[in-house]
Image (spheres, coloured by chain):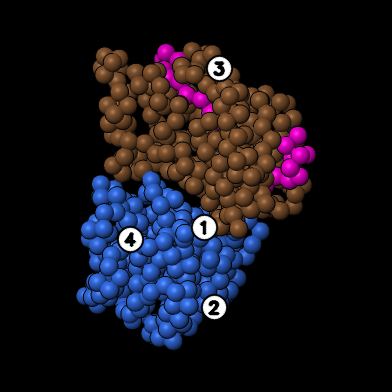
Amino acid sequence: MGRVEGKVAFVTGAARGQGRSHALRLAQEGADIIAVDIEDQIGTVPYPMSTPDDMAETVRQIEALDRRIVATKADVRDYDATKAALDEGVAQLGRLDIVAANAGIFSFGSMEELTEEQWSDMLDTNLTGVWHAVKAAIPHLKAGGNGGSIILTSSTAGLMAIPNIGHYVAAKHGVVGLMRTLALELAPDFIRVNSVHPTSVDTDMIQNDATYALFAGDLPVEERTRDVVGERFQTLNALPIKWVEPVDISNAVLWLASDESRYVTGVTLPIDAGSLIK
Amino acid sequence: MGRVEGKVAFITGAARGQGRSHAIRLAQEGADIIAVDLADHIPNIDYPSATEEDLAETVRQVEALDRRIIATKVDIRDRAALKAAVDEGVGQLGKLDIVVANAGICVIADWQGTSEDVWEQTIGTNLTGTWNTLQTTTQHLIDNGGGSIIMTSSAAGIKGLPFLSAYVASKHGVVGLMRAYATELAEYNVRVNTIHPTGVNTPMGTLGGGAFGPLLEAHPKLGGMLANLLPIEITEPVDQSNAVLWLASDESRYVTSLELTVDAGNTQF
């Protein structure tokens, strides 16, 4: 018996990275999946974003687990598209129990240098996009009458400041405010709302030339190797590791999604290798 | 394959209530157990003290799961006796991976009614006893190449609650201890976290509550502070154990210095 057997989970940003990992981990434990992803580029994002092929791979891996998945190309900045994708998924899979609002982007610049476009892309995706996913999901969760669990992906940057990503810090702090308000409003319906706060996760969002330049801009390009940059990442953490793996975040999401945490709500849950205590 | 298969867990206050539940939940997922409990009369409390029969019942239930358990009657305020029990358990079971510092007491009294006895007893057990637990176990975790320490604080370790001043002070102290140890032990891959229950359906959580009645009648404005956000009156021990299990397992291998509320939202308002 899986730990979320028979439940249905809505996962945003599910084409790859943490989102795919969440979908797989939940499916391994018995859930069916409603997946969305932009599968396209956003102009101010300095690394390649997901593709339709990535989403096809997520679908393949879920189906290999004998679980069902309804996957749609949808941008969380577009409420109507997000809602339509979720409504169709619920229509096909019959219910909704879990929301993992994971979709997010990363870019950099000091507060002085950030452009209007960088700011709006960031806030529209990482904050408004989270609200869109949850807003679309609440009627389905309430209609089910079984309560529910909403997990919002924030960041260590949702609880502390980090220089040169002020728009990301602002968006991720905003997610915490959203989580706390939702936890208060939805408790009477037994819908729990919590946030997860990863440190650096070993995904395409950090393993790219642009992020390497941010962490090792003092070195020539050819010396910015995964190992060398990893040493720089490790200085962020208290535990002696460079970064965490997507499955570490997924294991937290799984616990929060399952009935094992049935009385847990309003929690800001760091999976941060102790970076917040440094 | 259990979620903590092959690991060894040390649990204080394991005779009944949350401690017994932690022992059973970890054993169900493959851990062997080193258990201690005072298992003797506690003065000043409004609920029955745990007994040697209670501790024997924990042993019976863990053994029924085909797991090993070494149980000893120990007061965690007694450092030497505690150390002997830990060392004996680790000697027999071979190593230590998980520490659950759960033992605690709770005395309900307003500030005038909180005697020096109650203060000493509460701080001595809930805070100094927890420190003794860490001091006698940490080296075993380091010797094992890492581990997970879970300390039981309370909603009263995050916010003030009325008529529990000694308890609130002790449980806030546990958070300070957790944060300090988390910084020092990170380099050894030892993770340190707290859980923060709201009311739990145990003898301490149910039979000890009577003293609140007249105090809340006299101070009705404060009653809401004890209420939960989720529409439930009380959590079950297994809800706390499921949080302990997650923190004890490798599923949370990069989680440290976390205050994990299992409080039905009590601290949210």
B216 relative to A210 in the view: left or right: right
Q: Residue B100: x and y, percent?
A: 38, 64
Query: Which residue type carries mark 4?
Result: Asp
Which residue is labeled 1 in the image? B262
Gap between marks 2 and 3 measured at Cα: 59 Å
Rounded to the nearest whole Å, what is the CA distance between mark 3 and mark 1?
39 Å
Residue position marked by numbered label 3 in the rendering:
A42
Residue at figure coordinates x 60%, y 58% from the top left: A1
- Magenta: predominant secondary structure element? loop
Q: Nearer the viewer, residue A20 or A123?
A: A20
Q: Please give left or right for residue B162 compared with residue A217 in the image.
A: right
| Chain at tag 4 | B
Q: Amino acid at mark 2?
A: Leu
Chain letter tied to blue: B
Indicate which disc, 1 or 4, sits on the residue closer to the N terminus.
4
Which mark is nearer the camera, 3 or 1?
3
Q: Which residues are magenta?
A: A88-114
Q: Are marks 3 and 1 in contact (CB under 8 Å)?
A: no
B66 or A240, nearer to the observer: B66
> What residue is disc 4 on?
B97
Question: Counting residues from the N terminus, which is met first, the one under dot 2 or under dot 1?
Answer: 2
Q: Residues within 10 Å of mark 1 (few under 14, many from 20)?
A: many
Q: Residue at x 66, y 49 (%)?
A: A7
Determine which of the numbered discs, if any, sits on residue B207 in the image.
Answer: 2
Describe the element under mark 2 as helix, strand or loop: helix
Nearer to us in this view, A255 or B182: A255
Q: Tell me the crowding category of disc 3: few under 14, some 14 to 19, or many 20 or more residues within 10 angstroms, Cα based.
A: some
